[in-house]
Structures are given as structure tokens and as C-alpha cells.
């Protein structure tokens, strides 16, 4: 029966299929979240959302890199099985197997390159956010200092990297990572010029980051006024770790609605921006509302579906 010539070679694909199933089943093994043995709530660290995105990116890279050789070899292995059961060999059929394997190799090569670039970008972003988060955590270690830090604070459709509550007011702190372009002699150019509406990096400019900080600052100001009935000063801060900041707003002497900092000695710079305006009672009201929203979002995000 002619159809057996095409059915029986499928036996040789069983080991490759088993390897593919193992790779798929192992993909999510690193994404198992840690939960507290006392409350059952997930244990969250600084920049947890960034950590989760990086873990997903690594899982995708692992899956693509594992499936690439398995799926690429399947047409050739099937063709080798056809040799044993087919009475006649067709060069056209073998050419088809070769073309399919080549296309699969090209597709997976593109996917793996994309995954590597994404993992590198997220790793750098996570490193920058961790540096900023750890600098902010130094503020809350002294027991006498009334500082509170909320990492990955949930807004309506996005998250704010850090919300810092101090006697001077509330700071919306977003972190952005960008690679340093190289000069002709190989040295990195780390200077970024800050204008009122854009950042001018060496070779390109961006507006979205400043707009995102302004949007988050406005949202948090309105949210706190609605839930606490307090008029609280809210400052927007964009941190570019490792960059040298040339702030043209300082040169012009204009009133500024947000700050762009390099992250060095961040805690000292933030607490020196304004005089103390919040008393203990107002800070406590703000902490309760911020903590309530953060906990509610944490339960919603981690609840099973």
C-alpha cells in the first residue's frame, strides 16, 4: 500500500517530538512565583514587573533555541525514513525536504536573534531600575526618617516604577535605560541634553519618556486628591543611570515641572528639592491609600484565572 510509505516514516519523528514536548513543558518552570508561607501572597522584590518581563523573555529564548534544532531536523529525518520504505527515490521530494529545513532554520535564526536583543535590553533596564530602587530603599532604613517607597505602583493602565513619599511631598520616579553610543575612538558618549519637551541623546532624540513621566505625575496627583482630599505636591523624576545630564532648563532659569537625574546620590538630591510640607497625619493618610491600592492590585494581578 502506497500510503504506508508516507505513514511509517513518522515513527522516526517520535524522539524529536518527545524532545519538543519536553522543551515546551520546561519553558515555564522558572516562572513559578514564590509565595509567603504565612499569608500566601506572592513575595515581590524591587522591579518585580521588570523581573517578570525578563523571565518571560528568557523563557521564549529558551523555547526558540531548544525547538530550533528539533523542528529544523524533522523534514530531513522524515526523508531518511522515506528511504527505507520507498521503492523509488525522488530528487524533487528530497529537494522539498531541504527547502523546508532551510526555511525553518532561517525563521528560527531570526527569532533567536530577536530574543537575544530583547533579553539584553530588558537586562539593562532591570539593572538600572534595581540601582534606582536600592538607592531609594536607603531612605527608609533609618527608623526616624518618615520615608515610604512603593515599587511598581499600579496606575490605570500601566505601572509607575517607584513612588516615594517624603516630608517634602511625593515623587513619581521613572527609570529609563539607553545604551551609550561610541565615538570614533571607541569611547562612550554619555552626555544627554534635556529640553522642556525632549531628550537629545548623541545621534537621536526622544519625547515619549518625558511625556510618560508627566502623565504619571498628573495621574497620581489627581488620584491622591480624590482618595485623600489632600493637595499634595507631586514631583516627576526621570532617572537615566550612567548618563551625564546637561539640563538646559537650569541654564534658562525656567520653572520646571519634572527633573531628569543621573541616579548618583539620588536620595540626597530628591530630599533637597523642596522644603518639608507634609505633617505626620497627612503622610499617614497617604501611606494608607497608596498601600491599599498596591495590595489590591497585587492580589488582582496574581489571582488565578
Image (cartoon, rainbow, N blue to C red):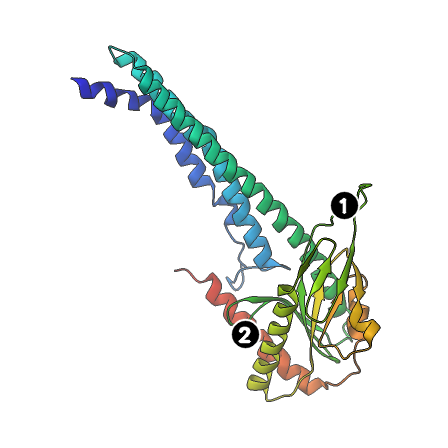
Residue ID for mark 2:
293
Q: Is residue 114 above or below residue 251?
A: above
What is the residue that sits farthest to the left in this orientation?
1
Instruction: Tell which tag, 2 or 1, sits nearer the viewer.
Output: 1
Identify the residue at horizontal 52%, vertical 63% (top origin): 41
Circle 1 SS class: loop
Q: Quadrant of residue 258?
A: bottom right
Identify the residue at horizontal 74%, vertical 50% (top origin): 180
* Residue 158 image offset from top left, x and y in percent: 54, 66
Front residue (pair 113, 163): 113
Residue 208 — which label?
Answer: none
Identify the residue at horizontal 76%, vertical 45% (top origin): 182
Q: Earlier in the sequence, mark 2 or mark 1?
A: 1
* Residue 47 image offset from top left, x and y in percent: 62, 59
Q: CA distance from mark 2 to mark 1?
A: 43 Å
Identify the residue at horizontal 78%, vertical 53% (top origin): 190
Front residue (pair 176, 110): 110
Q: Is residue 19 above or below residue 181?
A: above
Front residue (pair 165, 144): 165
In the picture, which quadrant includes the C terminus?
bottom left
Q: Is residue 178 above or below residue 163?
A: above
In the picture, which quadrant includes the N terminus?
top left
Residue ID for mark 1:
182
* Few, some or many residues within 10 Å of mark 2 (<14, 14–19, 20+): few
- Tell me: 200 left or right of 83: right
* Residue 100 image offset from top left, x and y in percent: 38, 28
Circle 2 SS class: helix
Amino acid at each position: 500500500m502506497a500510503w504506508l510509505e508516507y505513514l511509517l516514516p513518522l515513527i522516526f519523528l517520535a524522539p524529536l517530538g518527545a524532545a519538543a514536548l519536553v522543551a515546551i513543558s520546561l519553558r515555564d518552570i522558572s516562572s513559578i512565583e514564590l509565595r509567603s508561607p504565612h499569608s500566601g501572597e506572592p513575595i515581590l522584590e524591587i522591579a518585580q514587573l521588570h523581573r517578570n518581563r525578563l523571565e518571560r523573555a528568557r523563557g521564549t529564548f529558551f523555547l526558540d533555541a531548544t525547538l530550533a534544532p528539533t523542528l529544523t531536523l524533522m523534514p530531513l529525518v522524515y526523508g531518511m525514513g522515506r528511504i527505507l520504505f520507498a521503492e523509488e527515490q525522488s530528487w524533487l521530494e528530497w529537494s522539498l525536504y531541504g527547502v523546508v529545513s532551510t526555511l525553518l532554520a532561517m525563521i528560527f535564526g531570526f527569532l533567536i536573534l530577536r530574543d537575544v536583543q530583547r533579553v539584553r535590553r530588558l537586562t539593562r533596564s532591570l539593572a538600572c531600575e534595581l540601582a534606582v530602587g536600592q538607592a531609594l530603599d536607603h531612605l527608609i532604613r533609618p527608623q526616624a526618617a518618615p520615608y515610604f517607597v512603593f515599587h511598581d505602583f499600579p496606575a490605570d493602565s500601566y505601572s509607575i516604577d517607584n513612588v516615594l513619599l517624603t516630608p517634602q511631598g511625593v515623587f513619581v520616579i521613572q527609570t529609563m535605560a539607553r545604551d551609550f553610543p561610541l565615538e570614533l575612538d571607541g569611547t562612550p558618549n554619555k552626555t544627554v541634553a534635556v529640553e522642556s519637551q525632549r531628550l537629545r541623546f548623541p545621534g537621536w532624540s526622544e519625547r515619549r519618556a518625558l511625556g510618560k513621566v508627566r502623565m504619571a505625575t498628573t495621574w497620581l496627583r489627581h488620584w491622591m486628591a480624590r482618595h485623600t482630599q489632600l493637595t499634595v505636591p507631586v514631583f516627576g523624576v526621570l532617572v537615566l543611570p550612567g548618563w551625564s545630564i546637561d539640563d538646559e532648563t537650569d541654564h534658562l532659569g525656567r520653572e520646571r515641572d519634572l527633573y531628569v537625574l543621573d541616579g548618583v546620590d539620588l536620595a540626597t538630591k530628591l530630599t533637597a528639592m523642596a522644603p518639608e510640607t507634609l505633617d505626620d497625619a497627612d503622610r499617614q493618610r497617604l501611606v494608607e491609600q497608596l498601600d491599599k491600592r498596591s495590595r489590591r492590585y497585587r492580589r488582582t494581578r496574581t489571582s488565578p484565572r
